[in-house]
Amino acid sequence: TTPQEVALADVRRGAAMFAKTAVPVIGLVETMSYFVDPAGNKHFLMGEGGGRRMADTLGLPLLAEIPMIQAIREGGDAGVPAALSNEAAGKVFHDLAHRVAIALDSLETKAPPEVVFED
């Protein structure tokens, strides 16, 4: 999600759908959380804390707050994943991947639903 309220409404609907269909949700990722200016100050252009509040409301961990980093957009445009970078952009995605791996490891595994096709 992004931090603003209109996006969080989509998260609420998605969470309700996943609960209804028994799809496990391991956490929430907030994108475009902030940007850091050259002096190191964080600016929250889309609002602050929306992802954390939503994660708390849903009882989920906030897996990452991904900042607005130009290298992420540039890498996407060039087809080069930001996670391959050793810069701040790469660290954000490596940290997220680590948290996702931990969350997946802690899931109770259940048999997948059976899909039946009828003639």
Image (tube, rainbow, N blue to C red):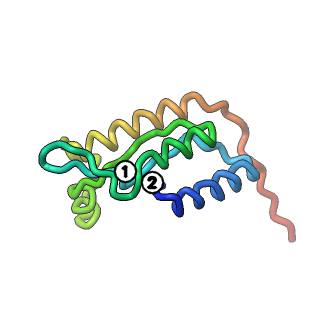
Give residue 47's mark: none
Task: Identify the residue position indicated by label 2 in the image.
Answer: 3
Instruction: Tell me the quadrant of the picture where the C terminus can be found.
Output: bottom right
Task: Identify the residue position indicated by label 1 in the image.
Answer: 33
Secondary element under disc 1, as helix, strand or loop, is loop
> Is 84 placed left or right of 108 in the picture?
left
> Is 19 placed left or right of 118 in the picture?
left
Which residue shows up at 61% across the image and 32% down it? 107
Query: Where's residue 82, x and y in %?
Result: 27, 51
Whichever of labels 2 and 1 marks the residue nearer the N terminus, that label is 2
Which residue shows up at 68% across the image and 47% down it? 23
Instruction: Please tell me whether residue 41 is drawn above or below residue 105 in the rendered image.
Output: below
Query: Where's residue 59, x and y in %?
Result: 62, 37
Q: Residue furthest right?
A: 119
- Marks 2 and 1, Cα distance to the nearest angstrom? 6 Å
Whether the residues at callouts 2 and 1 have beta carbons within 8 Å, the answer is yes
- Mark 1: amino acid: Ser
Secondary element under disc 2, as helix, strand or loop, is loop
> Is 55 placed left or right of 41 in the picture?
right
Which residue shows up at 55% across the image and 56% down it? 8
Instruction: Please tell me whether residue 71 is drawn above or below residue 41 in the rendered image.
Output: below
Query: Where's residue 97, x and y in %?
Result: 40, 39
Which residue shows up at 29% across the image and 54% down it? 68
Instruction: Please tell me whether residue 31 is drawn above or below residue 104 in the rendered image.
Output: below
> Label 2: how many residues lie within 10 Å, few (<14), some (14-19) or many (20+)?
many
In the foreground, 99 or 38: 38
> Label 1: how many residues lie within 10 Å, few (<14), some (14-19) or many (20+)?
many
Q: Residue furthest bottom?
A: 119
In the foreground, 105 or 114: 105
- Mark 2: amino acid: Pro
